[in-house]
Image (cartoon, rainbow, N blue to C red):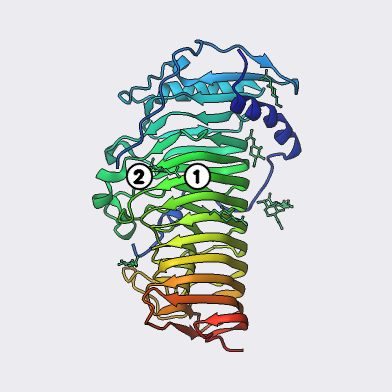
Amino acid sequence: MACSRNIALICSFALLWTAEFGFADDLGYTLAPAPSPFTDETDGEDPTAPPPVDATRPVSAPPSTNATGGACQIFDVTNYGAVGDGNNPANEAFQAAWAAACKLGAQSTMLVPGGVFLLNPIKFSGPCNVTPGVEIRGRLLAPANMDSFPDRAWISFETLSQLNITGVGTGVIDGQGQDTWAAHGTCHRDSNCKLAPVGLDLVAINGGSLGDITSLNSKGFHMGMWGSSNFLIHNANITAPGSSPNTDGIHISGSSNITVTDSQIGTGDDCISIGASTTNITITNVQCGPGHGISLGSLGKYPNEKEVFGLTVRNCTFTGTSNGARIKTWPGSPDNTVSNVIFEDLTMENVSNPIIINQNYCDGKHGCSSEPSRVKLTDIHFKNIKGTSFTPAAVTLTCSEGMPCSEVHLTDIDLQHILAAQSLTAVCSNAQGITAGVQNPTSCLST
Ligand SMILES: *[C@@H]1O[C@H](CO)[C@@H](O)[C@H](O)[C@H]1NC(C)=O
Ligand SMILES: *[C@@H]1O[C@H](CO)[C@@H](O)[C@H](O)[C@H]1NC(C)=O
Ligand SMILES: *[C@@H]1O[C@H](CO)[C@@H](O)[C@H](O)[C@H]1NC(C)=O
Ligand SMILES: *[C@@H]1O[C@H](CO)[C@@H](O)[C@H](O)[C@H]1NC(C)=O
Ligand SMILES: *[C@@H]1O[C@H](CO)[C@@H](O)[C@H](O)[C@H]1NC(C)=O
Ligand SMILES: *[C@@H]1O[C@H](CO)[C@@H](O)[C@H](O)[C@H]1NC(C)=O
Ligand SMILES: CC(=O)N[C@H]1CO[C@H](CO)[C@@H](O)[C@@H]1O
Protein backbone atom coordinates (compact mmCIF):
# COMPACT_ATOMS: atom_id res chain seq x y z
CA MET A 1 0.00 0.00 0.00
CA ALA A 2 1.34 3.40 -0.93
CA CYS A 3 1.50 6.13 1.61
CA SER A 4 -1.03 8.89 1.23
CA ARG A 5 0.38 12.19 0.06
CA ASN A 6 0.75 13.63 3.54
CA ILE A 7 2.14 10.48 5.01
CA ALA A 8 4.59 10.14 2.16
CA LEU A 9 5.76 13.68 2.81
CA ILE A 10 6.22 13.10 6.50
CA CYS A 11 8.01 9.85 5.91
CA SER A 12 10.30 11.17 3.24
CA PHE A 13 11.28 14.26 5.21
CA ALA A 14 11.83 12.54 8.49
CA LEU A 15 15.23 11.08 7.71
CA LEU A 16 16.49 14.24 6.09
CA TRP A 17 15.52 16.33 9.11
CA THR A 18 16.95 13.90 11.58
CA ALA A 19 20.19 13.87 9.69
CA GLU A 20 20.37 17.65 9.55
CA PHE A 21 19.80 18.43 13.21
CA GLY A 22 20.73 16.12 16.03
CA PHE A 23 18.82 16.15 19.29
CA ALA A 24 21.45 17.19 21.68
CA ASP A 25 20.51 20.61 22.90
CA ASP A 26 21.06 21.36 26.46
CA LEU A 27 18.95 24.43 26.86
CA GLY A 28 19.92 24.68 30.47
CA TYR A 29 16.34 24.95 31.65
CA THR A 30 14.66 22.78 34.16
CA LEU A 31 11.90 20.87 32.52
CA ALA A 32 10.29 19.80 35.72
CA PRO A 33 6.60 20.63 35.66
CA ALA A 34 7.04 23.73 37.72
CA PRO A 35 3.91 25.62 38.63
CA SER A 36 5.03 28.69 36.73
CA PRO A 37 3.79 27.78 33.26
CA PHE A 38 0.24 27.50 34.44
CA THR A 39 0.04 30.44 36.69
CA ASP A 40 -0.63 33.07 34.17
CA GLU A 41 -2.48 35.48 36.35
CA THR A 42 -4.36 37.10 33.59
CA ASP A 43 -7.42 39.13 34.08
CA GLY A 44 -8.81 36.40 33.86
CA GLU A 45 -20.33 24.80 20.76
CA ASP A 46 -20.88 22.39 18.91
CA PRO A 47 -18.04 20.22 17.65
CA THR A 48 -17.79 19.85 13.93
CA ALA A 49 -18.83 16.49 12.56
CA PRO A 50 -15.93 14.05 12.36
CA PRO A 51 -14.89 12.87 8.93
CA PRO A 52 -16.15 9.41 8.04
CA VAL A 53 -14.12 6.41 9.19
CA ASP A 54 -12.01 4.92 6.42
CA ALA A 55 -13.26 1.35 6.47
CA THR A 56 -11.12 0.35 3.52
CA ARG A 57 -7.84 0.74 5.35
CA PRO A 58 -6.06 -2.62 5.57
CA VAL A 59 -5.48 -4.12 8.98
CA SER A 60 -1.74 -3.96 8.72
CA ALA A 61 0.00 -1.68 6.29
CA PRO A 62 3.21 -3.14 4.92
CA PRO A 63 6.26 -0.92 4.61
CA SER A 64 6.52 0.79 1.23
CA THR A 65 9.79 2.02 -0.15
CA ASN A 66 9.85 5.42 -1.80
CA ALA A 67 12.09 7.58 -3.88
CA THR A 68 14.24 8.59 -0.94
CA GLY A 69 14.95 4.97 -0.24
CA GLY A 70 13.26 4.96 3.18
CA ALA A 71 10.57 2.58 4.29
CA CYS A 72 7.31 4.27 5.15
CA GLN A 73 5.23 2.32 7.56
CA ILE A 74 1.86 3.41 8.83
CA PHE A 75 0.74 2.60 12.35
CA ASP A 76 -3.00 3.09 12.32
CA VAL A 77 -4.38 3.24 15.85
CA THR A 78 -7.45 1.29 14.77
CA ASN A 79 -5.19 -1.64 13.93
CA TYR A 80 -4.27 -1.70 17.61
CA GLY A 81 -7.84 -1.81 18.81
CA ALA A 82 -8.91 1.83 18.89
CA VAL A 83 -12.56 2.30 17.97
CA GLY A 84 -13.53 5.74 16.75
CA ASP A 85 -16.98 5.81 18.28
CA GLY A 86 -16.18 8.23 21.09
CA ASN A 87 -17.10 5.70 23.76
CA ASN A 88 -14.21 3.82 25.29
CA PRO A 89 -10.85 5.40 26.06
CA ALA A 90 -8.44 4.41 23.29
CA ASN A 91 -5.29 4.97 25.35
CA GLU A 92 -3.94 1.42 25.13
CA ALA A 93 -4.29 1.30 21.36
CA PHE A 94 -2.66 4.72 20.87
CA GLN A 95 0.14 3.82 23.22
CA ALA A 96 0.77 0.51 21.43
CA ALA A 97 0.76 2.14 17.99
CA TRP A 98 3.18 4.79 19.23
CA ALA A 99 5.49 2.26 20.87
CA ALA A 100 5.67 0.20 17.68
CA ALA A 101 6.31 3.24 15.49
CA CYS A 102 8.83 4.71 17.91
CA LYS A 103 10.95 1.60 18.07
CA LEU A 104 10.79 0.90 14.33
CA GLY A 105 14.01 2.69 13.51
CA ALA A 106 12.73 3.85 10.13
CA GLN A 107 10.33 6.44 8.80
CA SER A 108 6.80 5.87 9.97
CA THR A 109 3.53 7.59 10.69
CA MET A 110 1.15 7.08 13.56
CA LEU A 111 -2.24 7.58 11.97
CA VAL A 112 -5.47 8.53 13.69
CA PRO A 113 -8.10 8.04 10.99
CA GLY A 114 -11.51 9.70 10.91
CA GLY A 115 -13.70 9.01 13.91
CA VAL A 116 -13.98 10.22 17.48
CA PHE A 117 -11.39 8.82 19.84
CA LEU A 118 -11.92 9.29 23.55
CA LEU A 119 -8.56 9.61 25.29
CA ASN A 120 -7.67 9.81 28.94
CA PRO A 121 -4.44 11.72 29.65
CA ILE A 122 -1.73 10.25 27.44
CA LYS A 123 1.98 10.82 26.92
CA PHE A 124 3.95 10.04 23.78
CA SER A 125 7.54 9.96 24.90
CA GLY A 126 10.82 9.71 23.11
CA PRO A 127 13.47 9.54 22.17
CA CYS A 128 12.67 7.33 19.18
CA ASN A 129 15.20 6.10 16.67
CA VAL A 130 13.28 8.00 14.04
CA THR A 131 10.42 10.07 15.39
CA PRO A 132 7.15 8.95 13.81
CA GLY A 133 5.07 11.52 11.99
CA VAL A 134 1.66 11.97 13.60
CA GLU A 135 -1.37 12.40 11.40
CA ILE A 136 -4.68 13.15 13.09
CA ARG A 137 -7.61 13.06 10.70
CA GLY A 138 -10.36 12.53 13.24
CA ARG A 139 -11.30 14.00 16.58
CA LEU A 140 -9.51 13.40 19.85
CA LEU A 141 -11.98 13.84 22.68
CA ALA A 142 -11.07 14.56 26.29
CA PRO A 143 -13.20 13.16 29.10
CA ALA A 144 -15.62 15.83 30.22
CA ASN A 145 -14.89 15.27 33.89
CA MET A 146 -11.84 16.63 35.72
CA ASP A 147 -11.53 13.42 37.78
CA SER A 148 -9.78 11.84 34.82
CA PHE A 149 -6.92 14.34 35.02
CA PRO A 150 -4.39 13.66 37.71
CA ASP A 151 -1.66 15.50 35.79
CA ARG A 152 -0.97 18.86 34.30
CA ALA A 153 -1.72 17.87 30.74
CA TRP A 154 -4.08 15.90 28.57
CA ILE A 155 -2.01 14.95 25.49
CA SER A 156 1.77 15.28 25.81
CA PHE A 157 4.64 14.76 23.47
CA GLU A 158 7.97 14.69 25.24
CA THR A 159 11.69 14.42 24.46
CA LEU A 160 11.50 14.08 20.70
CA SER A 161 13.40 15.47 17.75
CA GLN A 162 11.82 16.33 14.41
CA LEU A 163 8.27 15.76 15.55
CA ASN A 164 5.78 16.59 12.80
CA ILE A 165 2.13 16.53 13.80
CA THR A 166 -0.52 17.34 11.23
CA GLY A 167 -4.28 17.48 11.45
CA VAL A 168 -4.46 17.59 7.61
CA GLY A 169 -7.18 20.22 7.95
CA THR A 170 -9.70 17.87 9.55
CA GLY A 171 -8.11 16.88 12.85
CA VAL A 172 -9.65 18.29 16.01
CA ILE A 173 -8.34 18.21 19.57
CA ASP A 174 -11.48 18.64 21.62
CA GLY A 175 -10.79 19.38 25.28
CA GLN A 176 -14.46 19.47 26.31
CA GLY A 177 -13.77 22.24 28.77
CA GLN A 178 -17.34 23.49 28.92
CA ASP A 179 -18.17 21.60 32.10
CA THR A 180 -14.99 22.44 33.98
CA TRP A 181 -14.39 26.13 33.25
CA ALA A 182 -16.68 27.35 36.00
CA ALA A 183 -15.16 25.17 38.73
CA HIS A 184 -11.51 24.94 37.68
CA GLY A 185 -10.78 27.85 35.39
CA THR A 186 -9.54 30.11 38.15
CA CYS A 187 -7.66 27.48 40.14
CA HIS A 188 -4.37 29.17 39.38
CA ARG A 189 -5.47 31.61 42.05
CA ASP A 190 -6.60 29.01 44.54
CA SER A 191 -4.32 26.26 45.75
CA ASN A 192 -7.27 24.26 47.03
CA CYS A 193 -8.62 23.40 43.65
CA LYS A 194 -7.22 21.41 40.78
CA LEU A 195 -5.74 23.27 37.86
CA ALA A 196 -7.31 22.58 34.49
CA PRO A 197 -4.91 20.66 32.23
CA VAL A 198 -3.24 22.00 29.11
CA GLY A 199 -4.73 20.35 26.02
CA LEU A 200 -1.63 19.63 23.94
CA ASP A 201 1.66 19.79 25.78
CA LEU A 202 4.94 19.83 23.85
CA VAL A 203 7.90 19.32 26.14
CA ALA A 204 11.56 19.12 25.09
CA ILE A 205 10.82 18.90 21.39
CA ASN A 206 13.67 19.88 19.09
CA GLY A 207 12.64 20.43 15.50
CA GLY A 208 9.44 19.71 13.66
CA SER A 209 6.03 21.22 13.24
CA LEU A 210 2.39 21.18 14.24
CA GLY A 211 -0.17 22.30 11.74
CA ASP A 212 -3.48 22.19 9.92
CA ILE A 213 -5.23 21.36 13.14
CA THR A 214 -8.06 22.65 15.34
CA SER A 215 -7.92 22.88 19.09
CA LEU A 216 -11.36 23.33 20.57
CA ASN A 217 -12.57 24.19 24.07
CA SER A 218 -9.52 23.18 26.06
CA LYS A 219 -9.95 22.89 29.80
CA GLY A 220 -6.85 24.98 30.53
CA PHE A 221 -4.31 26.30 28.02
CA HIS A 222 -4.94 24.93 24.54
CA MET A 223 -1.27 24.32 23.79
CA GLY A 224 1.88 24.59 25.84
CA MET A 225 5.45 24.48 24.66
CA TRP A 226 8.30 24.17 27.15
CA GLY A 227 12.03 23.53 26.77
CA SER A 228 11.70 23.18 23.01
CA SER A 229 13.44 24.60 19.96
CA ASN A 230 13.34 24.92 16.18
CA PHE A 231 9.62 24.29 15.91
CA LEU A 232 6.90 25.65 13.64
CA ILE A 233 3.20 25.96 14.48
CA HIS A 234 1.14 26.83 11.42
CA ASN A 235 -2.48 26.86 10.36
CA ALA A 236 -3.74 26.28 13.85
CA ASN A 237 -7.36 27.07 14.54
CA ILE A 238 -7.79 27.58 18.25
CA THR A 239 -11.29 28.16 19.49
CA ALA A 240 -12.99 28.63 22.84
CA PRO A 241 -15.51 31.19 24.07
CA GLY A 242 -14.22 34.59 25.12
CA SER A 243 -15.60 33.91 28.58
CA SER A 244 -13.67 30.66 29.17
CA PRO A 245 -11.09 31.26 31.93
CA ASN A 246 -7.33 30.69 31.54
CA THR A 247 -7.67 29.07 28.13
CA ASP A 248 -4.55 30.66 26.58
CA GLY A 249 -4.20 29.62 22.97
CA ILE A 250 -0.48 28.89 22.84
CA HIS A 251 1.91 29.33 25.75
CA ILE A 252 5.62 29.22 24.98
CA SER A 253 8.34 29.33 27.61
CA GLY A 254 11.90 28.10 28.03
CA SER A 255 12.09 27.69 24.27
CA SER A 256 14.05 29.01 21.27
CA ASN A 257 13.52 29.42 17.54
CA ILE A 258 9.77 28.92 17.58
CA THR A 259 7.53 30.26 14.83
CA VAL A 260 3.75 30.56 14.99
CA THR A 261 2.12 31.56 11.73
CA ASP A 262 -1.08 31.63 9.69
CA SER A 263 -3.37 30.87 12.60
CA GLN A 264 -6.74 31.93 13.99
CA ILE A 265 -6.96 32.11 17.74
CA GLY A 266 -10.10 33.06 19.59
CA THR A 267 -10.20 32.18 23.27
CA GLY A 268 -10.82 33.39 26.81
CA ASP A 269 -7.27 34.40 27.73
CA ASP A 270 -4.10 35.34 25.85
CA CYS A 271 -4.15 34.22 22.23
CA ILE A 272 -0.42 33.62 22.62
CA SER A 273 1.57 34.09 25.80
CA ILE A 274 5.36 34.06 25.92
CA GLY A 275 6.99 33.14 29.19
CA ALA A 276 10.49 33.52 30.57
CA SER A 277 13.72 32.04 29.19
CA THR A 278 12.64 32.33 25.58
CA THR A 279 14.68 33.50 22.62
CA ASN A 280 13.92 34.07 18.97
CA ILE A 281 10.17 33.63 18.87
CA THR A 282 8.40 34.77 15.69
CA ILE A 283 4.64 35.19 15.45
CA THR A 284 3.19 36.20 12.09
CA ASN A 285 -0.16 36.27 10.34
CA VAL A 286 -2.22 35.50 13.41
CA GLN A 287 -5.79 36.65 13.85
CA CYS A 288 -6.52 37.06 17.53
CA GLY A 289 -9.94 37.53 19.06
CA PRO A 290 -11.76 37.15 21.26
CA GLY A 291 -8.99 36.97 23.85
CA HIS A 292 -6.45 38.97 25.83
CA GLY A 293 -4.05 39.64 22.97
CA ILE A 294 -0.48 38.52 22.40
CA SER A 295 1.45 38.88 25.63
CA LEU A 296 5.03 38.71 26.68
CA GLY A 297 4.74 37.69 30.31
CA SER A 298 3.87 37.68 32.92
CA LEU A 299 7.54 37.70 33.88
CA GLY A 300 9.29 38.05 37.21
CA LYS A 301 7.04 36.03 39.42
CA TYR A 302 9.45 33.13 39.92
CA PRO A 303 13.15 32.87 40.73
CA ASN A 304 15.60 31.67 38.07
CA GLU A 305 13.75 33.02 35.09
CA LYS A 306 16.17 33.66 32.26
CA GLU A 307 16.18 36.49 29.77
CA VAL A 308 13.82 36.98 26.90
CA PHE A 309 15.59 38.03 23.73
CA GLY A 310 14.21 38.33 20.24
CA LEU A 311 10.41 38.29 20.06
CA THR A 312 8.83 39.43 16.80
CA VAL A 313 5.07 39.77 16.37
CA ARG A 314 4.23 40.83 12.81
CA ASN A 315 1.17 41.19 10.59
CA CYS A 316 -1.40 40.20 13.16
CA THR A 317 -4.97 41.40 13.64
CA PHE A 318 -6.66 41.80 17.00
CA THR A 319 -10.44 41.92 17.05
CA GLY A 320 -12.35 42.91 20.18
CA THR A 321 -9.51 41.79 22.46
CA SER A 322 -8.75 43.27 25.87
CA ASN A 323 -5.12 43.88 24.85
CA GLY A 324 -3.17 43.96 21.63
CA ALA A 325 0.62 44.05 22.02
CA ARG A 326 1.35 43.55 25.70
CA ILE A 327 4.34 43.12 28.02
CA LYS A 328 3.70 42.48 31.69
CA THR A 329 6.04 41.91 34.62
CA TRP A 330 5.49 41.51 38.35
CA PRO A 331 6.50 44.06 40.94
CA GLY A 332 9.19 42.93 43.37
CA SER A 333 10.65 40.55 40.80
CA PRO A 334 14.19 39.16 40.63
CA ASP A 335 16.58 40.71 38.07
CA ASN A 336 15.96 39.80 34.45
CA THR A 337 16.19 41.38 31.01
CA VAL A 338 13.89 41.59 28.03
CA SER A 339 15.34 42.95 24.80
CA ASN A 340 14.95 43.00 21.04
CA VAL A 341 11.18 42.83 21.02
CA ILE A 342 9.36 43.93 17.86
CA PHE A 343 5.62 44.37 17.48
CA GLU A 344 4.96 45.52 13.92
CA ASP A 345 2.33 45.75 11.21
CA LEU A 346 -0.54 45.14 13.61
CA THR A 347 -4.19 46.00 13.10
CA MET A 348 -6.35 46.72 16.13
CA GLU A 349 -10.11 46.49 15.83
CA ASN A 350 -11.84 47.81 18.94
CA VAL A 351 -9.08 46.66 21.27
CA SER A 352 -9.23 47.88 24.87
CA ASN A 353 -5.46 48.36 25.34
CA PRO A 354 -3.84 48.25 21.90
CA ILE A 355 -0.29 48.88 23.17
CA ILE A 356 0.49 48.19 26.79
CA ILE A 357 3.51 47.66 28.99
CA ASN A 358 2.59 46.99 32.60
CA GLN A 359 5.45 46.42 35.01
CA ASN A 360 3.12 46.53 37.99
CA TYR A 361 1.24 43.47 36.98
CA CYS A 362 -0.40 41.79 39.92
CA ASP A 363 -3.73 40.12 40.25
CA GLY A 364 -4.07 41.26 43.85
CA LYS A 365 -4.34 37.79 45.32
CA HIS A 366 -0.70 37.13 46.07
CA GLY A 367 0.00 40.11 48.24
CA CYS A 368 1.36 42.49 45.66
CA SER A 369 4.88 43.69 46.35
CA SER A 370 5.45 47.39 46.76
CA GLU A 371 8.98 46.99 45.35
CA PRO A 372 9.42 47.86 41.69
CA SER A 373 9.84 45.16 39.10
CA ARG A 374 13.48 44.36 38.37
CA VAL A 375 12.84 43.11 34.87
CA LYS A 376 14.67 45.53 32.59
CA LEU A 377 12.94 46.22 29.28
CA THR A 378 15.13 47.64 26.54
CA ASP A 379 15.11 47.81 22.74
CA ILE A 380 11.36 47.41 22.43
CA HIS A 381 9.75 48.37 19.11
CA PHE A 382 6.15 49.19 18.29
CA LYS A 383 5.93 49.93 14.59
CA ASN A 384 3.09 50.49 12.11
CA ILE A 385 0.25 49.81 14.49
CA LYS A 386 -3.11 51.08 13.35
CA GLY A 387 -6.81 50.70 13.99
CA THR A 388 -9.22 51.41 16.80
CA SER A 389 -9.10 51.47 20.56
CA PHE A 390 -12.06 50.84 22.85
CA THR A 391 -10.56 52.84 25.74
CA PRO A 392 -9.02 56.33 25.62
CA ALA A 393 -5.61 55.11 26.89
CA ALA A 394 -4.53 53.50 23.64
CA VAL A 395 -0.84 53.51 24.50
CA THR A 396 0.12 52.67 28.08
CA LEU A 397 3.78 52.34 28.97
CA THR A 398 3.97 51.76 32.72
CA CYS A 399 7.60 50.87 33.25
CA SER A 400 9.47 50.06 36.41
CA GLU A 401 10.54 52.83 38.72
CA GLY A 402 13.59 50.76 39.64
CA MET A 403 14.49 49.71 36.10
CA PRO A 404 13.02 52.24 33.66
CA CYS A 405 12.34 51.07 30.10
CA SER A 406 14.96 52.26 27.66
CA GLU A 407 15.07 52.45 23.91
CA VAL A 408 11.37 52.07 23.39
CA HIS A 409 10.72 52.88 19.73
CA LEU A 410 7.29 54.12 18.69
CA THR A 411 7.10 54.32 14.90
CA ASP A 412 3.98 55.05 12.85
CA ILE A 413 1.38 54.57 15.53
CA ASP A 414 -1.99 55.51 14.09
CA LEU A 415 -4.88 54.66 16.39
CA GLN A 416 -8.37 56.14 16.70
CA HIS A 417 -11.03 55.76 19.35
CA ILE A 418 -13.77 53.34 18.32
CA LEU A 419 -16.19 56.23 18.85
CA ALA A 420 -15.17 58.84 16.32
CA ALA A 421 -15.84 61.78 18.61
CA GLN A 422 -13.48 60.69 21.38
CA SER A 423 -9.77 61.31 21.55
CA LEU A 424 -6.98 59.03 22.68
CA THR A 425 -4.09 59.49 25.06
CA ALA A 426 -0.75 57.87 25.69
CA VAL A 427 0.24 57.30 29.30
CA CYS A 428 3.88 56.78 30.26
CA SER A 429 5.87 56.30 33.40
CA ASN A 430 9.60 55.64 33.45
CA ALA A 431 9.63 55.09 29.70
CA GLN A 432 12.50 56.45 27.61
CA GLY A 433 12.72 56.13 23.88
CA ILE A 434 12.50 57.47 20.36
CA THR A 435 9.58 58.25 18.09
CA ALA A 436 9.34 58.36 14.32
CA GLY A 437 6.52 58.88 11.85
CA VAL A 438 2.87 59.36 12.77
CA GLN A 439 1.97 59.41 16.48
CA ASN A 440 -1.73 59.06 17.21
CA PRO A 441 -2.05 59.42 20.15
CA THR A 442 0.81 61.87 20.80
CA SER A 443 3.76 60.05 22.26
CA CYS A 444 4.57 60.36 25.95
CA LEU A 445 8.06 58.84 25.83
CA SER A 446 10.84 60.80 27.46
CA THR A 447 13.94 61.24 25.35
C1 LIG B 1 8.37 18.91 9.50
O1 LIG B 1 8.49 20.23 10.08
C2 LIG B 1 9.46 21.05 9.48
C3 LIG B 1 9.41 22.39 10.15
O2 LIG B 1 10.00 22.39 11.38
C4 LIG B 1 9.19 21.24 8.00
O3 LIG B 1 10.21 21.98 7.41
C5 LIG B 1 9.06 19.90 7.33
O4 LIG B 1 8.69 20.09 5.99
C6 LIG B 1 7.99 19.10 8.03
N1 LIG B 1 7.79 17.85 7.35
C7 LIG B 1 6.60 17.53 6.88
C8 LIG B 1 6.55 16.23 6.19
O5 LIG B 1 5.61 18.23 7.00
C1 LIG C 1 -12.12 26.60 13.59
O1 LIG C 1 -12.75 25.58 14.36
C2 LIG C 1 -14.09 25.87 14.68
C3 LIG C 1 -14.58 24.78 15.59
O2 LIG C 1 -14.36 23.52 15.06
C4 LIG C 1 -14.89 25.97 13.40
O3 LIG C 1 -16.22 26.31 13.71
C5 LIG C 1 -14.29 27.03 12.50
O4 LIG C 1 -14.94 27.03 11.26
C6 LIG C 1 -12.83 26.76 12.28
N1 LIG C 1 -12.26 27.89 11.56
C7 LIG C 1 -11.41 27.73 10.56
C8 LIG C 1 -10.89 28.98 9.95
O5 LIG C 1 -11.05 26.63 10.17
C1 LIG D 1 15.31 32.30 14.67
O1 LIG D 1 14.44 31.21 14.39
C2 LIG D 1 14.23 31.00 13.01
C3 LIG D 1 13.27 29.84 12.88
O2 LIG D 1 12.22 29.96 13.75
C4 LIG D 1 15.54 30.70 12.33
O3 LIG D 1 15.31 30.57 10.95
C5 LIG D 1 16.52 31.82 12.58
O4 LIG D 1 17.77 31.48 12.03
C6 LIG D 1 16.68 32.04 14.07
N1 LIG D 1 17.54 33.19 14.30
C7 LIG D 1 18.42 33.22 15.27
C8 LIG D 1 19.24 34.47 15.38
O5 LIG D 1 18.58 32.29 16.06
C1 LIG E 1 18.33 28.68 16.74
O1 LIG E 1 18.64 28.90 15.38
C2 LIG E 1 19.97 29.35 15.19
C3 LIG E 1 20.13 29.71 13.73
O2 LIG E 1 19.68 28.67 12.91
C4 LIG E 1 20.94 28.28 15.65
O3 LIG E 1 22.26 28.73 15.51
C5 LIG E 1 20.68 27.96 17.10
O4 LIG E 1 21.50 26.87 17.51
C6 LIG E 1 19.23 27.58 17.31
N1 LIG E 1 18.96 27.43 18.72
C7 LIG E 1 18.64 26.25 19.25
C8 LIG E 1 18.42 26.24 20.71
O5 LIG E 1 18.52 25.23 18.58
C1 LIG F 1 -0.80 39.02 6.72
O1 LIG F 1 -1.69 38.08 7.33
C2 LIG F 1 -2.80 37.76 6.51
C3 LIG F 1 -3.66 36.76 7.27
O2 LIG F 1 -3.93 37.17 8.55
C4 LIG F 1 -2.35 37.15 5.21
O3 LIG F 1 -3.47 36.92 4.39
C5 LIG F 1 -1.38 38.07 4.51
O4 LIG F 1 -0.87 37.43 3.38
C6 LIG F 1 -0.24 38.42 5.44
N1 LIG F 1 0.64 39.38 4.81
C7 LIG F 1 1.93 39.17 4.68
C8 LIG F 1 2.70 40.27 4.04
O5 LIG F 1 2.47 38.16 5.08
C1 LIG G 1 -16.06 47.22 21.36
O1 LIG G 1 -15.70 46.38 22.43
C2 LIG G 1 -16.53 46.57 23.57
C3 LIG G 1 -15.95 45.78 24.75
O2 LIG G 1 -15.12 44.76 24.36
C4 LIG G 1 -17.94 46.16 23.25
O3 LIG G 1 -18.75 46.34 24.37
C5 LIG G 1 -18.44 47.01 22.10
O4 LIG G 1 -19.70 46.57 21.70
C6 LIG G 1 -17.49 46.92 20.92
N1 LIG G 1 -17.88 47.88 19.92
C7 LIG G 1 -17.89 47.59 18.63
C8 LIG G 1 -18.31 48.67 17.72
O5 LIG G 1 -17.58 46.49 18.20
C1 LIG H 1 5.82 4.87 -2.24
C2 LIG H 1 5.83 6.26 -1.78
O1 LIG H 1 5.11 6.64 -0.89
N1 LIG H 1 6.70 7.06 -2.36
C3 LIG H 1 6.82 8.46 -2.02
C4 LIG H 1 8.21 8.77 -1.48
O2 LIG H 1 8.36 10.17 -1.25
C5 LIG H 1 8.14 10.99 -2.37
C6 LIG H 1 8.30 12.44 -1.94
O3 LIG H 1 9.61 12.70 -1.60
C7 LIG H 1 6.74 10.77 -2.91
O4 LIG H 1 6.60 11.54 -4.09
C8 LIG H 1 6.54 9.32 -3.22
O5 LIG H 1 5.19 9.14 -3.58
- Where in the figure is residue 335, as x and y percent of width and height? 56, 72
Say whether residue 335 is visible.
yes
Q: Nearer the viewer, mark 2 or mark 1?
A: 1
Q: Is mark 2 within 8 Å of ligand 2?
A: no
**Rendering quarter of residue 217:** top left
Q: Compared to 310, does 419 lie above or below? A: below
Q: Nearer the viewer, residue 403 or 119?
A: 119
**Label 1: few (<14), some or many (≥20) within 10 Å?**
many
Q: Which residue is mark 2?
A: 217
Q: Nearer the viewer, residue 194 or 240?
A: 240
Quarter holding the N terminus is top right
Q: Nearer the viewer, residue 186 or 77?
A: 77
Q: Compared to 95, does 429 lie above or below? A: below
Residue positioned 54% across, 35% down in the render: 166
Q: Nearer the viewer, residue 35 or 294?
A: 294
Q: Which residue is mark 1?
A: 236
Q: Is mark 1 within 8 Å of ligand 2?
A: no
Quarter of the displayed picture in which ligand 2 can be seen: top left
Q: Is residue 87 left or right of residue 22?
A: left
Say whether residue 249 is visible.
no
- Where in the figure is residue 236, as x and y percent of width and height? 50, 44
The reply to whether callout 2 and callout 1 are in contact (CB within 8 Å) is no
Q: Which residue ends up furthest to the front in the rendered image? A: 420
